[in-house]
Image (cartoon, rainbow, N blue to C red):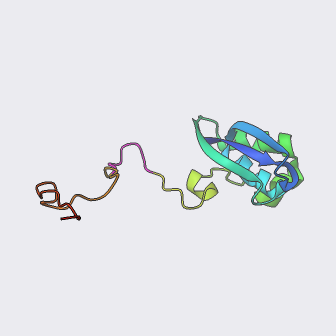
């Protein structure tokens, strides 16, 4: 189960932020439901743990109550396995064993540009 750190703007108010650390991603969906879709900000990865679906369901129901839980996760046996890309739109998730393309910084070199003599524009 993936975990996250984030800040929650209580009632959507910028001046009232609370930091949440090491929470299951499913909890972010509940917090968004309670405080507003834009109220959970600065979401970052915080690792993972080996808790089972049932453990997370029990935890979320204990903290937020059965009614609020069922609004976000309806059904008799809901899955709370949420992936980071479901929480943070546009987030590209790369698996650890998946090769990554090298990151290029700066301008692409132009062939022969380094060999050209400097030209003085005043001449």
Relative height, residue 91 to residue 55 (above, below):
below
Q: Which of these two is toward me, 89 or 59?
A: 89
Q: Which of these two is toward me, 14 or 26?
A: 14
Residue 37 at x, y percent in the picture: 76, 60
Residue 79 at x, y percent in the picture: 67, 53
Residue 5 at x, y percent in the picture: 67, 40
Quadrant where the image shows the C terminus = bottom left
Count the marks. Answer: 0
Q: Evaluate whether residue 104 shows in this view.
A: yes
Q: Which of these two is toward me, 62 or 12?
A: 12
Q: Evaluate whether residue 1 shows in this view.
A: no
Quadrant where the image shows the N terminus = top right
- Left or right of 87? Residue 122 is left
User: Is 3 in the magenta?
Assistant: no
Q: To which quarter of the image does residue 61 belong?
A: top right
From this viewpoint, which residue is outermost toward the front? 123
Question: What residue is at 74 percent from the left and 44 percent from the top?
Answer: 7
Question: What residue is at 56 percent from the left and 56 percent from the top?
Answer: 85
Relative height, residue 63 to residue 13 (above, below):
above
Question: What residue is at 17 percent from the left and 61 percent from the top?
Answer: 119
Relative height, residue 24 to residue 33 (above, below):
above
- Left or right of 80? Residue 118 is left
Q: What's the magenta bit mostly, secondary-structure-wise?
A: loop
Span colored in magenta: 94-100
Question: What residue is at 43 percent from the left and 50 percent from the top?
Answer: 94
Residue 53 at x, y percent in the picture: 67, 44
- Left or right of 81? Residue 71 is right
- Left or right of 74? Residue 108 is left
């Amino acid at each position: 189960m993936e975990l996250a750190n984030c800040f929650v703007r209580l009632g959507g108010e910028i001046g009232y932020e609370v930091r949440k650390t090491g929470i299951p991603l499913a909890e972010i969906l509940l917090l968004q439901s309670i405080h507003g879709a834009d109220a959970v900000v600065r979401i970052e990865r915080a690792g993972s743990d080996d808790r089972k679906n049932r453990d997370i369901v029990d935890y979320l129901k204990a903290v937020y109550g059965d009614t609020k839980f069922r609004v976000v996760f309806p059904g008799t046996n809901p899955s709370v396995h949420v992936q980071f890309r479901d929480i943070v739109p546009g987030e590209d998730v790369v698996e650890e064993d998946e090769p990554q393309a090298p990151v290029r910084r700066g301008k692409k070199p132009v062939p022969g540009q380094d060999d050209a003599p400097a030209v003085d524009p005043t001449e």
